[in-house]
Amino acid sequence: MCRCFGIVAGADEEVVTQNDLFDALTDPDPESAGYDLRDQPRPFGEDLPVQVLTNVYVSFLGHIDDERLEFETHLVVGHRWNDPRLNFANANGLNQTQVAAFREVEGESWFADNMWTPNIFVENEQSSQVMELVRENVFVAIDRGGNVKMSYRVFANVLCDMDLRRFPHDDQICFIKFESCA
């Protein structure tokens, strides 16, 4: 799901692509953007943490292992946050008329690897990994105001404290607990 394109430029101008725009916004050179992916964005001021909104879609739930007290699940995880450093007005060195024509830039895992992303994980996981076919299933979109949307697919084995004393006439309630290290 990548719509890669550039903006038409005059004969003496170079075309600005979405990759050019992303590179300009995340350039670590202090003379340019000065972006440090290790620093958490501060959209509400220096003393306040960034607010990350998370949604989870459970696309598969199964293979319940009553001996290991775990189950298998496939999740689609989405996050949204604002990183004011990624506001398109901060794209130094690019033709601002061409930059203004972009509503958003979209990328895959390479984008996510070169910008700050929340460290959110399944707290009660036995194991997990980002799913992939040819490469990791990660999608990132950044709009003009620095609002970021990121989604990815996760395969996880999740622990569940099952009470099997009434098996096979039992009901189990299992939780998927999310946590952040930030």
Image (cartoon, grey):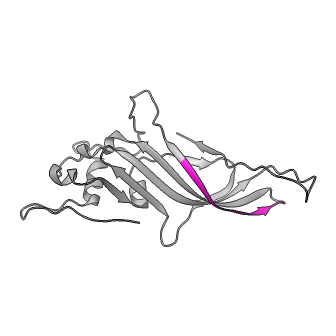
The quarter holding residue 75 reads bottom right
In-front residue for pair 46/144:
144
- Residue 95 appears in the figure: no
Q: Which residue reaches farthest right? A: 166
Image-quadrant location for residue 179: top right
Q: Is residue 92 left or right of residue 130?
A: left
Quadrant of the snapshot with the N terminus: bottom left
- Determine whether 84 is above or below 165 in the image: above
Residue at 87% in and 50% down: 163
How many discs appear?
0
Q: Could you say which is closer to the camera, residue 174 or residue 86?
A: 174
Q: Main secondary structure of the magenta part?
A: strand
The residue positioned 29% from the left and 59% from the top of the image is 19
Tell whether position 62 is magenta.
yes
> How far from the left and from the top, in percent, is residue 160?
77, 51
Report the side of 55 relative to 122 (left or right). Answer: left
Residue positioned most to the left: 12
* 161 relative to 74, above or below: above
Residue located farthest toward the bottom when viewing the structure as drawn: 134
| Magenta residues (range) | 55-67
Q: Residue at x 38, y 35 (%)?
A: 43
Is residue 94 inside the magenta stretch? no
Q: Position of residue 5 (x, y in %)?
A: 27, 65
Residue at position x 44%, y 59% in the image: 139
Residue 2 visible? The answer is: yes
**Residue 48 spot, x, y in % from top left:** 45, 29
User: x and y percent of residue 52 in the render?
Assistant: 49, 41
